């Protein structure tokens, strides 16, 4: 109950502080970049709550299973790094500059979708949040979930690779359409919706690729999943890069302060989306190939062990 009290106090403090500390006004120019630290109370609250729940669940799980069991220290490092990347994307001067430059906004989106999301998924053990809850609450959540057949069906539907691929692609293309993108820049509410869509679709994407139901996609399906995603995101990047006119004129009042034109900023954003994101998908492809080769090598080594050693093992077990 103590942690709940602290959380309630924290929420109240953040809400009270918001009108005073929230970033407002024109986007920063280069000379005041490092003085521009946006204060987003709900982002801070989400990060703090995520970290608290993760650490509380980890403490209880390790107390039961042993240190480093069920969740490895490497997973903990991945999850913490994912939260840090979200903080850099949304709470650092990068977030302020993203209101002035399309290229900075593109970096922000890449950090959220292609860096933070896979790190969080690699670091997350699905039952960890339940371990953070009191025993009675945990059992109550389990009973509630077992009675919600419709929700279970919906979650199974969301775990289908084709569904997730489509959601991810539609989210990416929709929010880079000039009309919707500029609406997000002009409105805080729409901007929040954009970021929620990016993070949620990316978490689903990396979840299905790596962890859904504790079973990763078969190698062929994973390669197709990643390759086709790289193709359509590369196509979008190419459209942005080679467009002959500015697609996002909303940045017109601000880009000149950074020594750029609308078109050069747009081209830079397209290249940023094209090359680094392509490397992320390539790295994921190579990782899956390495996993498959390592698994095949381990199975081959086991099958090729001398028969005598297997007989000796059998005799040892029977003795």
Image: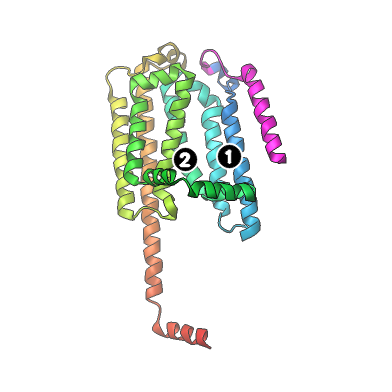
Between discs 1 and 2, the one toward the N terminus: 1
Residue at the spot 43% in from the left edge and 43% down from the top edge: 151
**Mark linked to residue 212:** none
Question: As displayed, is residue 31 above or below residue 115?
Answer: above
Q: Quadrant of the N terminus?
A: top right
Instruction: Name the magenta segment's main secondary structure.
Output: helix
| Residue 102 x %, y % | 41, 22
| Residue 285 x %, y % | 36, 49
Question: As displayed, is residue 258 above or below residue 81?
Answer: above
Q: Which residues are magenta?
A: 1-30
User: In this view of the protein, can residue 76 be seen by the observer?
Assistant: no
| Residue 96 x %, y % | 52, 21
| Quadrant of res 297 | bottom left
| Quadrant of res 52 | top right
Left or right: residue 108 versus residue 48 is left
Numbered-mark total: 2
Question: Looking at this view, is 102 or 90 the one in front?
Answer: 90
Q: Label 1 belongs to which residue? A: 50
| Quadrant of res 249 | top left
**Mark linked to residue 117:** 2
Coloring scheme used: rainbow
Left or right: residue 168 versus residue 26 is left
Question: As displayed, is residue 158 above or below residue 247?
Answer: below
**Does 283 lie within the magenta span?**
no
Circle 2 residues within 10 Å: few <14, some 14–19, many ≥20: many
């Amino acid at each position: 109950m103590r942690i709940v009290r602290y959380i309630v106090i924290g929420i109240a403090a953040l809400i009270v502080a918001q009108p005073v500390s929230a970033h407002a006004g024109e986007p920063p120019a280069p000379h005041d970049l490092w003085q521009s630290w946006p204060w987003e109370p709900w982002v801070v609250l989400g990060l703090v709550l995520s970290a608290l729940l993760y650490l509380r669940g980890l403490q209880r799980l390790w107390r039961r299973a042993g240190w480093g069991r069920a969740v490895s220290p490497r997973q903990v490092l991945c999850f913490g790094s994912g939260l840090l990347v979200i903080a850099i994307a949304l709470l650092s001067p990068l977030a302020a500059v993203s209101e002035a430059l399309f290229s900075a906004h593109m970096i922000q989106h890449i950090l959220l979708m292609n860096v933070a999301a896979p790190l969080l998924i690699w670091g997350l053990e699905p039952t960890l949040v339940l371990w953070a809850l009191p025993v009675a609450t945990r059992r109550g959540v389990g009973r509630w979930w077992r009675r919600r057949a419709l929700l279970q069906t919906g979650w199974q539907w969301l775990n289908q690779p084709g569904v997730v691929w489509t959601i991810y692609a539609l989210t990416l293309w929709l929010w880079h359409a000039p009309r919707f993108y500029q609406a997000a820049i002009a409105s805080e509410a729409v901007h929040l919706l954009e970021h929620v869509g990016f993070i949620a679709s990316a978490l689903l994407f990396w979840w299905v690729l790596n962890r859904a139901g504790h079973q990763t996609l078969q190698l062929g399906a994973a390669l197709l999943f990643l390759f086709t995603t790289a193709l359509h995101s590369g196509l979008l990047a190419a459209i942005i890069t080679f467009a002959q006119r500015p697609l996002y004129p909303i940045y017109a009042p601000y880009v000149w302060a950074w020594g750029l034109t609308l078109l050069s900023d747009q081209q830079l954003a397209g290249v940023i989306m094209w090359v680094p994101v392509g490397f992320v998908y390539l790295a994921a492809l190579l990782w899956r190939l390495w996993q498959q080769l390592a698994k095949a090598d381990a199975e081959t080594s086991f099958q090729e062990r001398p028969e005598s050693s297997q007989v000796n093992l059998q005799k040892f077990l029977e003795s």
